[in-house]
Image (tube, rainbow, N blue to C red):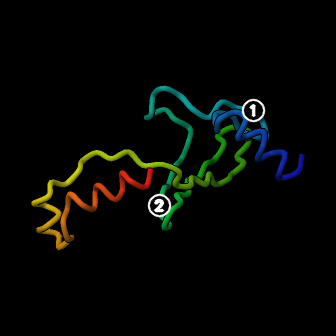
Amino acid sequence: MDKDQLRDTYLRSGGKQCPFCGTELMTDDVTESPRYMRGYKDADRVLASVRCPTCHARWEEIFTLNNIDILYTPSPMEMLAAGVDGGGGSAQMIIDKE
Ligand SMILES: [Zn+2]
């Protein structure tokens, strides 16, 4: 299999199976997980290093930003304190774009 086929196989498994030997990479118990992950942020993408415990293949998962979930909306007072003009107005602008 070439690299494109290996990638497609891996993505089809949802990142759960080694694309080379088919070993299940995920376990429910994190402490027993064979997956070694080292994530870091590079602007809008995160890379995670993965190693198969069975065949020792190594690859990198590439996560790209595609959505956000707003956890807290600042009050108009907080927007003013942050130096943003007319806090409520900014929020209204964002809503209008949808
Ligand atoms: Zn493997």
Kind of residue at badge 2: Tyr
16 and 82: which is toward the camera: 82
Residue at far front of view: 96
Relative to residue 57, is residue 86 drawn left or right?
left
Q: Position of residue 19 (x, y in %)?
A: 76, 40
Residue 69 is left or right of residue 24, and the answer is left
Q: Secondary structure at mark 1?
A: loop
Q: Residue beneath label 2, please?
A: 40
Q: Which residue is mark 1?
A: 22
Q: Is residue 41 above or below residue 56?
A: below
Which quadrant does ligand 1 occupy?
Answer: top right
Q: Amino acid at mark 1?
A: Gly
**In percent of the image, x 78 and y 36: which residue is there?**
21
> What is the secondary structure assignment of the residue under circle 2?
strand
Looking at marks 1 and 2 on the same chain, the residue that comes earlier in the sequence is marked by 1
Residue 50 drawn above or below residue 43 = above
Residue 49 on image: x %, y %: 58, 53
Query: For the residue carrying disc 2, how many other residues have a C-alpha within 10 Å: few (<14), some (14-19), or many (20+)?
Result: few
Closer to the eye: label 1 or 2: 2
Residue 22 at x, y percent in the picture: 75, 32
Residue at (34%, 59%) from the top-left corner? 93
Q: Provide residue 37's location: percent of width, then percent of height.
A: 51, 49
Q: Nearer the viewer, residue 28 or 74?
A: 74
Q: Residue at x 15, y 54 (%)?
A: 75
The image quadrant of residue 90 is: bottom left
Q: CA distance from mark 1 to mark 2?
A: 26 Å
